[in-house]
Amino acid sequence: MGAGRDGRGIGVALLAALPGLPPQANVRVSNTGRAMAGRGGRANSGASGKAPQGRIQVDWTGEAEASKSGEANSGVELD
């Protein structure tokens, strides 16, 4: 679990609203690794943040796991 198509997780994730991106930037998140969070933490192996005006593509994300009131996201979660 948590690996890309070739079975290896790269472990790279991007936020959908990276500081410094133009307002209409396109964002792609792909082949991310596993993300884990403990008590009250946040695990994100996909994309989250403020929605850009451009296109967002998220595929082949790794497993996201949270425990003890934590939050997990392995897809797209926009404000």
Image: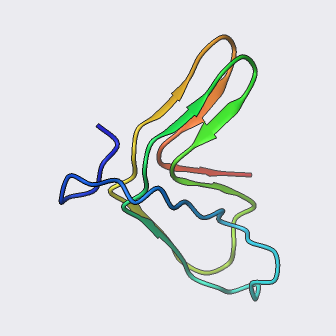
Q: Is residue 35 left or right of residue 53?
A: left
Where is residue 29? Give x, y as percent: 48, 66
Nearer to me, 58 or 39: 39
Nearer the observer, 28 or 24? 28
**Left or right side of 10 for 49:** right
Residue 23 position, x and y percent, is 76, 84
- The residue sitting at 32% across, 56% down in the picture is 60
Residue for point 81% across, 75% down? 19
Q: Residue furthest left?
A: 6
What residue is drawn where x is 69% and y is 65%?
Answer: 51
In the depicted view, which residue is nearer to us: 1 or 23? 1
Residue 26 on image: x %, y %: 57, 82
Where residue 18 appears, as percent x and y from the top left, is: 74, 71
Task: Check the picture and name the quadrant holding the N terminus.
Answer: top left
In the image, what residue occupies the spot 61% across and 81% down? 54
Place residue 6 in its image quadrant.
bottom left
